[in-house]
Image (cartoon, grey):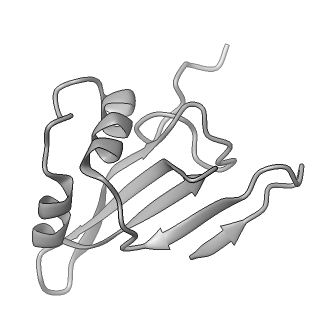
Protein backbone atom coordinates (compact mmCIF):
# COMPACT_ATOMS: atom_id res chain seq x y z
CA UNK A 1 0.00 0.00 0.00
CA UNK A 2 1.08 3.54 -0.70
CA UNK A 3 -0.28 6.18 1.70
CA UNK A 4 -0.87 9.71 0.44
CA UNK A 5 -1.49 12.51 2.89
CA UNK A 6 -3.16 15.55 1.30
CA UNK A 7 -1.71 18.92 2.20
CA UNK A 8 -4.48 19.71 4.69
CA UNK A 9 -3.23 16.75 6.76
CA UNK A 10 -6.70 15.54 7.70
CA UNK A 11 -7.32 12.60 5.36
CA UNK A 12 -5.17 9.59 4.56
CA UNK A 13 -5.70 7.87 1.22
CA UNK A 14 -4.04 4.54 0.56
CA UNK A 15 -3.43 2.88 -2.80
CA UNK A 16 -3.00 -0.83 -3.26
CA UNK A 17 -1.92 -2.64 -6.43
CA UNK A 18 -4.14 -5.71 -6.91
CA UNK A 19 -5.86 -4.81 -3.65
CA UNK A 20 -8.67 -6.93 -2.28
CA UNK A 21 -12.19 -5.60 -2.80
CA UNK A 22 -15.82 -6.66 -2.59
CA UNK A 23 -17.85 -6.88 -5.80
CA UNK A 24 -20.57 -4.74 -4.23
CA UNK A 25 -18.10 -1.93 -3.44
CA UNK A 26 -16.72 -1.77 -7.00
CA UNK A 27 -20.26 -2.16 -8.40
CA UNK A 28 -21.53 0.78 -6.34
CA UNK A 29 -18.52 2.92 -7.26
CA UNK A 30 -18.92 2.01 -10.95
CA UNK A 31 -22.65 2.83 -10.84
CA UNK A 32 -21.87 6.19 -9.23
CA UNK A 33 -19.38 7.08 -11.95
CA UNK A 34 -20.88 5.48 -15.05
CA UNK A 35 -24.56 5.06 -14.18
CA UNK A 36 -26.54 2.00 -13.12
CA UNK A 37 -26.41 -1.24 -15.04
CA UNK A 38 -23.18 -2.93 -13.93
CA UNK A 39 -23.90 -3.35 -10.20
CA UNK A 40 -24.23 -7.16 -10.39
CA UNK A 41 -20.99 -7.71 -12.35
CA UNK A 42 -18.55 -10.19 -10.82
CA UNK A 43 -15.68 -7.70 -10.81
CA UNK A 44 -13.30 -10.01 -8.95
CA UNK A 45 -13.61 -12.78 -11.54
CA UNK A 46 -13.40 -10.29 -14.39
CA UNK A 47 -10.19 -8.58 -13.27
CA UNK A 48 -8.52 -11.85 -12.25
CA UNK A 49 -9.30 -13.29 -15.68
CA UNK A 50 -8.58 -10.30 -17.94
CA UNK A 51 -6.36 -7.81 -16.13
CA UNK A 52 -2.70 -7.31 -15.48
CA UNK A 53 -3.80 -5.65 -12.27
CA UNK A 54 -5.87 -2.92 -10.70
CA UNK A 55 -5.47 -0.21 -8.10
CA UNK A 56 -7.83 0.29 -5.18
CA UNK A 57 -7.82 3.69 -3.48
CA UNK A 58 -9.18 3.72 0.06
CA UNK A 59 -10.26 6.54 2.30
CA UNK A 60 -11.56 5.99 5.84
CA UNK A 61 -11.53 2.22 5.23
CA UNK A 62 -13.88 2.40 2.24
CA UNK A 63 -13.24 2.06 -1.48
CA UNK A 64 -12.85 5.61 -2.82
CA UNK A 65 -11.35 4.87 -6.25
CA UNK A 66 -10.64 2.04 -8.66
CA UNK A 67 -8.70 1.66 -11.88
CA UNK A 68 -8.38 -1.52 -13.95
CA UNK A 69 -5.21 -2.24 -15.95
CA UNK A 70 -6.37 -4.63 -18.69
CA UNK A 71 -3.92 -6.35 -21.02
CA UNK A 72 -3.61 -8.67 -23.97
CA UNK A 73 -1.48 -11.21 -22.09
CA UNK A 74 1.63 -9.96 -23.85
CA UNK A 75 3.14 -6.53 -24.35
CA UNK A 76 0.07 -4.27 -24.34
CA UNK A 77 -1.77 -2.93 -21.31
CA UNK A 78 -4.33 -0.16 -21.03
CA UNK A 79 -6.41 1.52 -18.35
CA UNK A 80 -10.17 0.96 -18.02
CA UNK A 81 -12.89 1.64 -15.46
CA UNK A 82 -11.15 4.60 -13.82
CA UNK A 83 -13.64 5.88 -11.28
CA UNK A 84 -13.49 7.90 -8.06
CA UNK A 85 -16.26 8.47 -5.52
CA UNK A 86 -17.61 12.00 -5.61
CA UNK A 87 -17.28 12.09 -1.81
CA UNK A 88 -13.58 11.18 -1.85
CA UNK A 89 -10.70 13.52 -1.10
CA UNK A 90 -8.46 12.14 -3.84
CA UNK A 91 -6.99 15.45 -5.01
CA UNK A 92 -5.70 14.60 -8.47
CA UNK A 93 -8.62 12.47 -9.71
CA UNK A 94 -11.89 14.26 -10.39
CA UNK A 95 -15.05 12.42 -9.30
CA UNK A 96 -16.77 10.13 -11.77
CA UNK A 97 -15.33 8.25 -14.73
CA UNK A 98 -12.01 10.04 -15.02
CA UNK A 99 -13.56 13.43 -15.91
CA UNK A 100 -15.03 16.38 -14.02
CA UNK A 101 -18.61 15.85 -12.90
CA UNK A 102 -19.61 19.21 -14.38
CA UNK A 103 -18.20 21.55 -16.97
CA UNK A 104 -16.20 24.53 -15.74
CA UNK A 105 -18.43 27.52 -15.43
Corner quadrant of residue 88: top right
Identify which residue, 97 or 59, lies in the foreground. Answer: 59
Q: In this view, does 34 lie above or below 8?
A: above
Q: Which residue lies furthest to the top in this view?
A: 105
- Quarter of the image containing the C terminus? top right
Identify the residue at horizontal 53%, vertical 35% (top origin).
95
The quarter of the image holding the N terminus is bottom right
Q: Nearest the camera: 98 or 50? A: 50
Q: Looking at the rendering, which quadrant does residue 33 occupy?
A: top left
Indicate the position of residue 37 as horizontal and vertical percent values.
16, 27
Provide residue 31's location: percent of width, then percent of height: 31, 30
Foreground pick, 69 / 88: 88
The answer to whether 14 appears left or right of 66 in the picture is right
| Percent of width and height locating residue 17 | 43, 75
Q: Can you say whether 21 is above or below 37 in the image? A: below
Horizontally, residue 24 falls left or right of residue 1, namely left
Above or below, comparing residue 58 to residue 3 in the picture: above
Extreme-right residue of the structure: 8
Determine which quarter of the picture holds residue 103: top right
From the viewer's perspective, tell me whether residue 75 is left or right of residue 26: left
User: How many numbered circles does the render carry?
Assistant: 0
Q: Residue at x 31, y 53 (%)?
A: 22
Q: Which residue is drawn at 68% across and 43% down?
A: 89
Where does residue 27 sit, x and y in percent of width and height? 27, 40
Amino acid sequence: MFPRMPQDGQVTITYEWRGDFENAAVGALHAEGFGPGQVSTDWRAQVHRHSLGWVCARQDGGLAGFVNVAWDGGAHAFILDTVVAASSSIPWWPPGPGAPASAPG
